[in-house]
Image (cartoon, rainbow, N blue to C red):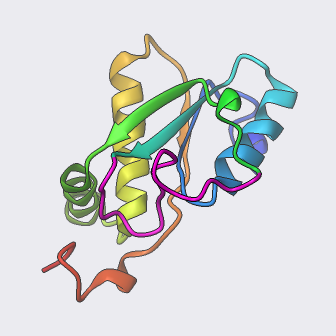
Amino acid sequence: EIWKQTNGQVDYFVSAIGTSGTIMGVGKYLKEYNPNVKIVCAHPVKGHYIQGLKNMEEAIVPSIYDPSKIDLEVMIETKDAFEMTRKLAKYEGIFAGMSSGAAMLAAVETAKKADCGVIVTIFPDRGDRYLSTDLFL
């Protein structure tokens, strides 16, 4: 779907990391079509509180996770992911969850460093799951 909707014009694919299924699977697929696509991981820092995400240095590492398949890594602080999630709701009307905020933050950081190109990210969760948490209180 990503490849078709962008007409094969993907330069960066940004994904938050939990089970690593999305970043490993989509990354593999995109690299088959264009080996120059950069796979960017939104990697939470140690001790984070971003539900659904894992810091691979302190978590049980899924067997499908292969760090050699990741080209760039953006370390994400909990407070920054929460802030981006709130901005998505307030300014873009996107009611996403905290791991989506982490993915968006990594996409923005990638855009700041890229000369040009198409950056694609996936929002893995929705905001209604977090209405009673610190994310939206």
**Whole-percent x and y of residue 49?**
30, 64
Front-most of 1 and 53?
53
> In the current view of this chain or complex, which residue is farthest to the left?
137
**Whole-percent x and y of residue 89?**
26, 66
Write the residue at 76% across / 50% down. 64
Write the residue at 35% across / 72% down. 95
Residue 74: quadrant of the picture? top left
- Magenta span main SS: loop
**Whole-percent x and y of residue 33?**
85, 28
**Whole-percent x and y of residue 40?**
54, 33
Q: Is residue 48 above or below residue 136?
A: above
| Residue 54 covered by magenta stretch | yes
Front-most of 49 and 74?
49
* Left/right of residue 45 with respect to residue 59 in the rendered view: left
> In the current view of this chain or complex, which residue is farthest to the bottom?
132
Write the residue at 21% across / 49% down. 80
